[in-house]
């Protein structure tokens, strides 16, 4: 009896796919800008992975919460933000309208449940303006850590302005090299891993806060490897490629760790916690 009820809770009203398609059409300029962004900027691509995993979780999760029609107000606000910025030629500034509208639609329709809907917030790359505002503090701190490791091993390295210098080669660092994008992406993966195992928002947030700081550690390790590549190749091309694409190794490791941890958490969750996640 309970099994039949849980399956019926996941059945969609015939108009729900049409509403989601209409929302996607309304947000299409912002979505296309997001696709162009991840195509050009390697540091933004992990957020596309978080978004794809979120879509898969929303599609496969049968849970349904109570409908909250006030969610349509959030939909209207998110769409308005996106359209106003598109009309003003500042499409990227309207990107927060994406998660706002998606979460609002989920609340209004009751599906996907809130922990999964909130993955939309983690699927949006941080604005470059934020990374630039934190620059050069973050990348300088990580760069000096890598320089210290190199010097302790007997190498000669220094960091001047935005350049990592090693022997006769140099590597120009950019704001995303500070590790904030990787930290946020790992936080999003931790959130997804718990949410898809029926975790509530509190459990998801705790998992994200635990894993996100390791993104800064992983970025520091990548910088050390980049300096080793710089020393071996005496050119910044290989080191730059390592910084641009090496984050995927940290992401793969995070997926393995969070999947195992979330599975253990799901087995240990009491029934009341599962019921709370469905609301």
Image: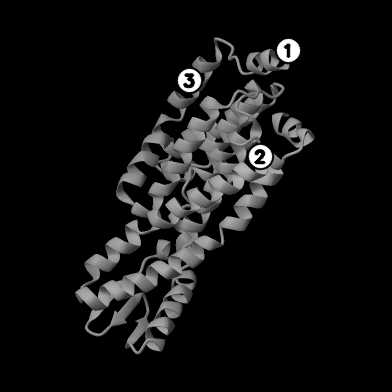
- In the picture, residue 5 is in which quadrant? top right
User: Is residue 79 placed above or below 169 in the rendered structure?
Assistant: above
Counting from the top left corner in percent of width and height, residue 144 is at 44, 80
Secondary structure type for disc 2: helix
Counting residues from the N terminus, which is met first, the one under dot 1 or under dot 3? Answer: 1
**Label 2 Cα neighbours within 10 Å, binned few <14 / some 14-19 / many ≥20:** some
Disc 1: which residue:
1
Separation of residues labelled 2 and 1 (CA atoms): 23 Å
Q: Residue at x 20, y 73 (%)?
A: 233
**Label 1 Cα neighbours within 10 Å, binned few <14 / some 14-19 / many ≥20:** few
Residue nearest the viewer, comparing 88 with 119: 119
Disc 2: which residue:
266
Q: How many marks?
A: 3
Label number found at residue 22? 3
- In the picture, residue 175 is in which quadrant? bottom left
- Quadrant (top left/top right/bottom left/bottom right) for the C terminus: top right
Counting residues from the N terminus, which is met first, the one under dot 2 or under dot 1? Answer: 1
- Quadrant (top left/top right/bottom left/bottom right) for the N terminus: top right
Secondary structure type for disc 3: helix
**Left or right position of 138 against 64:** left
Q: In this rendering, does residue 84 appear at all?
A: no
Secondary structure type for disc 1: loop
Q: Residue at x 33, y 42 (%)?
A: 36
Separation of residues labelled 3 and 2 (CA atoms): 35 Å
């Amino acid at each position: 009896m309970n099994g039949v009820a849980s399956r019926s809770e996941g059945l969609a009203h015939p108009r729900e796919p049409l509403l989601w398609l209409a929302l996607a059409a309304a947000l299409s300029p912002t979505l296309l800008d997001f696709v162009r962004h991840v195509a050009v900027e390697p540091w933004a691509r992990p957020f596309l992975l978080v978004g794809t995993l979120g879509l898969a979780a929303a599609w496969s999760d049968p849970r349904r919460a109570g409908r909250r029609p006030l969610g349509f107000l959030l939909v209207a606000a998110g769409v308005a933000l996106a359209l106003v910025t598109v009309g003003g030629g500042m499409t990227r500034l309207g990107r927060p309208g994406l998660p706002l509208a998606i979460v609002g639609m989920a609340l209004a329709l009751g599906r996907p449940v809130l922990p999964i809907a909130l993955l939309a917030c983690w699927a949006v790359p941080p604005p470059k303006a934020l990374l630039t505002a934190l620059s050069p503090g973050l990348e300088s701190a990580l760069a000096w850590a890598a320089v210290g490791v190199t010097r302790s091993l007997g190498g000669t390295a220094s960091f001047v302005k935005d350049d990592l210098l090693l022997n006769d080669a140099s590597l120009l660092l950019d704001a995303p090299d500070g590790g904030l994008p990787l930290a946020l992406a790992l936080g999003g993966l931790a959130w997804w891993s718990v949410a898809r195992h029926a975790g509530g928002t509190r459990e998801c947030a705790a998992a994200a806060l635990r894993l996100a700081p390791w993104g800064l550690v992983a970025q520091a390790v990548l910088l050390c490897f980049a300096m080793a590549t710089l020393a071996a190749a005496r050119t910044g091309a290989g080191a730059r490629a390592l910084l641009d694409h090496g984050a995927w190794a940290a992401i793969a490791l995070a997926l393995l760790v969070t999947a195992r941890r979330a599975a253990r958490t799901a087995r240990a969750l009491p029934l009341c916690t599962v019921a709370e996640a469905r609301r």
